Image (cartoon, rainbow, N blue to C red):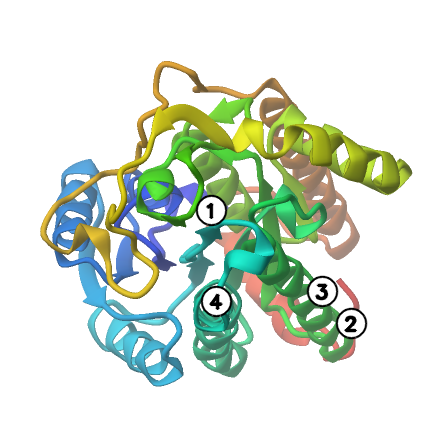
Amino acid sequence: MDVESVPRTVVITGASGGIGRACALAFAARGDRLGLIARGRAGLEAAVREAERAGAATAIGIEADVADAEAMEAAATRVEEELGPIEVWVNDAFASVFAPFIEITPEEFRRVTEVTYLGYVYATQAALTRMLRRDAGVIVQVGSAIAYRGIPLQSAYSGAKHAIQGFNEALRCELLASGSRVRTTMVQMPAVNTPQFDWVRSRLPEGAQPVPPIYQPEVAARAVLFAADHPRRREYWVGASTVATLVANAIAPGLLDRYLARTGFDSQQDGRSRSAGEPDNLFAPVDEGRDFGAHGRFDDRARAHSGQQRTVHALGALTDALRGAARRVATGVPATGAGRLSRMRGTCASQPRNRRV
């Protein structure tokens, strides 16, 4: 069955800007039903309108803080009441502080951890309890190369992304052990041109910027969409820079420590002087009264495509097609038509619960 031809109910956190906003438009273009979660009213309302114009079957905005477990449970309940059973849940919301570790207060460190790590935990719990009852669904965790490779000036964010990585690996093992058909996968992102670099709390003397090379949020959204359609793979790496970073960290982490010590401070600042008291979104949304959209201020430097991504997606789609063909041959399921769908459902229903995937 062609996944792309069947509208699904999709929930996205952090949907008012950046990668989350781009994901909302990508799923909307396929006619999915969208539950969009964010804190900023103006950004969220604009995301809903954009999604509807892009082709979403329907879209609702839910103002909620992912650091509030009860709010995530309430959001999941509302989505299922208004849109139907949740089939895909994308975790993307985060907060960060750009500063040397010693300059980050305990309150700030706690807040980053609660949003960026525990927000994923609470949202995943809300989604998973519902998906497990139906033995179906996909959870996509939006990660980062920083999930493996911490960088200076982002100690709180690096720690939270590492925590998500460990949490997701443990959860995936539990789902495999139980034979569940629910899938979870993680997408490790490169530097992306999003509004976060104007939203983030910063104590740097200059404006914050992503470490080049920079990619447009649509590149990230395509990766999330593909992961939602092909969730058997434990994780996806997006962009040649992510691949290079993670391979280098696996082979020579000590050398990478020294390299980042020399380059990591300057590469995260853009030369633009910051004025004191610039607003940030750590405790309150910056897009409450103004919509910022998906893109940041680095459009002139950001890449709209990734050759590495195209290759991975082509190979992934081919692998899934071959796996499906082999399964049909083994079970005698017809390859086309309603008979194929009926036989597939029958085959899935007869599978033993302790099967491995």
Q: Give x and y (percent) for residue 281.
A: 30, 56
Q: Which dot marks residue 169?
A: 3
Q: Which dot marks residue 105?
A: 4
Secondary structure under the numbered disc 3 in the rendered image = helix
Q: Earlier in the sequence, mark 2 or mark 1?
A: 1
Q: Which of marks 4 and 2 is nearer the N terminus?
A: 4
Residue 140 visible at all: no
Q: For label 4, count other residues whose C-alpha is less than 10 Å away and answer few (under 14), some (14-19) or many (20+).
A: few
| Residues tagged 2 and 1 counted as in contact (Cβ below 8 A) | no
| Residues tagged 4 and 1 counted as in contact (Cβ below 8 A) | no
Q: Residue furthest right?
A: 251
Q: Is residue 193 left or right of residue 248?
A: left
Q: What residue type is labelled 3?
A: Glu
Secondary structure under the numbered disc 2 in the rendered image = loop
Who is closer to the viewer here, 258 or 228? 258
> In the displayed structure, would residue 207 be above or below residue 310?
below
Q: In this view, does 205 lie to the left or right of 81?
A: right
Who is closer to the viewer here, 235 or 83? 235
Q: Name the residue under label 2.
A: 355
Per the model, the C-alpha gap separating discs 4 and 2 is 48 Å
Q: Which amino acid does label 1 sit on?
A: Val
Who is closer to the viewer here, 97 or 325? 97
Q: Which amino acid does label 4 sit on?
A: Thr
| Residues tagged 4 and 3 counted as in contact (Cβ below 8 A) | no
Q: Give x and y (percent) for residue 227.
A: 55, 46
Residue 129 visible at all: yes
Per the model, the C-alpha gap separating discs 2 and 1 is 23 Å
Secondary structure under the numbered disc 4 in the rendered image = loop
Q: Give x and y (percent) for residue 137.
A: 50, 66
Q: Which dot marks residue 62?
A: none
What residue is shown at x 43% (from left), y 20% (from top)?
Answer: 302
